[in-house]
Amino acid sequence: MKKYLKFIVSCAIVISMASVSFAADPIKVGLLAGFTGPIESLTPPMAAAAELAFSEISESGIFLGGKTIKAVRADSTCIDAAAATAAAERLVTVEKVVALIGPSCSGTSAAVTNKVSAPNGITTISSSATSAALSELKDNGYFFRTAPSDARQGQVLANITMKKGIKKVAITYTNNDYGKGLSESFGTEYKKLGGKILMISSHEDGKADYSAEVGSLSASGASDLVIFGFIDQGGKGIIQASLDSGAFDSFIFTDGMIGPSLTKHFGKALNGSYGTMPGGESAATEKWKGIAKSSGIAIDGPFRGSSYDAAALIALAIQAGNSTDKASIQKHVMGVANAPGEKIFAGELKKALEILAKGGEIDYVGAEDVEFNEIGEVYGAYQEMEVINGEFVSVKVH
């Protein structure tokens, strides 16, 4: 009898320990970002912002009845589609993630969505892939993005440029979907407004020297150079060759080129150069800036708030369906992102979880005023950024 009782007690302890272990196992979400490659200096604060949202969710004690959620990092490289796809496949098949944040860049987003996300029914929310071509993805409704399309960014930048009285430019773009898309949207709008493009040429990332590319661009006769590129490789190299040769000293950028590492490297040599990056000025964005600052996340570059939003939306979609089932997550993303429901700002994720746990509805506003259109994209606002005294400064919102 004593042996039998000991056996029962032992089984109870094992079951109890297993239950505790099961309860302690976090829900895993892939964080597929460009930790190496041409935007590697932009990626760490983006990742930190996404992980901040997950920490807020986990610490609430309400998520799926007390579970936690964590990001599993993987490197998309930004430009190597094969590497990004392999990383995504590992996250899905080995790490058993229930959703993906990312990839960071447009070309890798298309590859991952086509080869991994859509075929496997994995909800994927990119916070920084902005190519207009992504709007045409055959994604079966599994691809969303919290950063606005470059179709509008190119138009905004063209209008800013013409208002500055710059009527002739040369353009160089990184040879991928991101660069091509921006070149097309900017070029179309700029010419419609009366501007002249004296030369357009592509460049490849990862080269040691860009003097030949800059020489050709300079021969066009343009004084202002538009760079649709990346901050840590080709775009930076184009600037270096331009300044070294004296070919250009006035540059026009978009989000892939705006960050503290660029001004840290070139300093006041970039004074007067300007560009655009997603972001606005509203009650939502101001609240996010305060949260980011108190959490040690720098807001001197793009896609911080949109990364927080991507992570928050995945967690809230899980809570809304009370399930980590892949189809359930996809089904509930739009519902938590848009009206009707109580508005939820950054820092209010516990409140959102409480409402959803009681069967209520939320309208997630988040850090960047999220509102999805019918294909899961945001409209968004853009900050006009100018280099003043060697630093990027926000001078206007469009």
Image: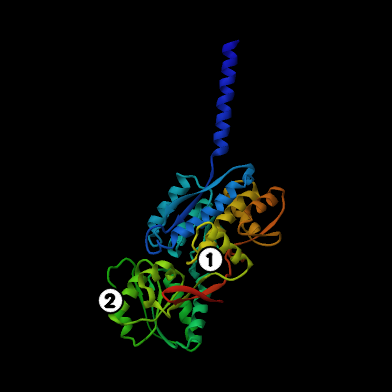
Name the residue: 57% across, 25% down. 13
How busy is the neighbourhood of tag 1: few (under 14 within 10 Å), some, or many (20 plus)? many
Q: Secondary structure at mark 2?
A: helix
From the top left corner, tell me how far across and down residue 37 is, in percent.
37, 61
Q: Which residue is mark 1?
A: 147
Q: Nearer the viewer, residue 60 or 119?
A: 60
Vertical arrangement, residue 333 with respect to residue 16, above or below:
below
Q: Residue at x 64, y 51 (%)?
A: 350
Q: Position of residue 49 (x, y in %)?
A: 52, 57
Numbered label tally: 2
Q: Residue at x 46, y 70 (%)?
A: 255
Residue 211 badge: 2
SS class, disc 1: loop
Q: Position of residue 170 (x, y in %)?
A: 38, 82
Q: Residue 307: x and y, percent? A: 52, 59
Mark 1 or mark 2, earlier in chain = 1
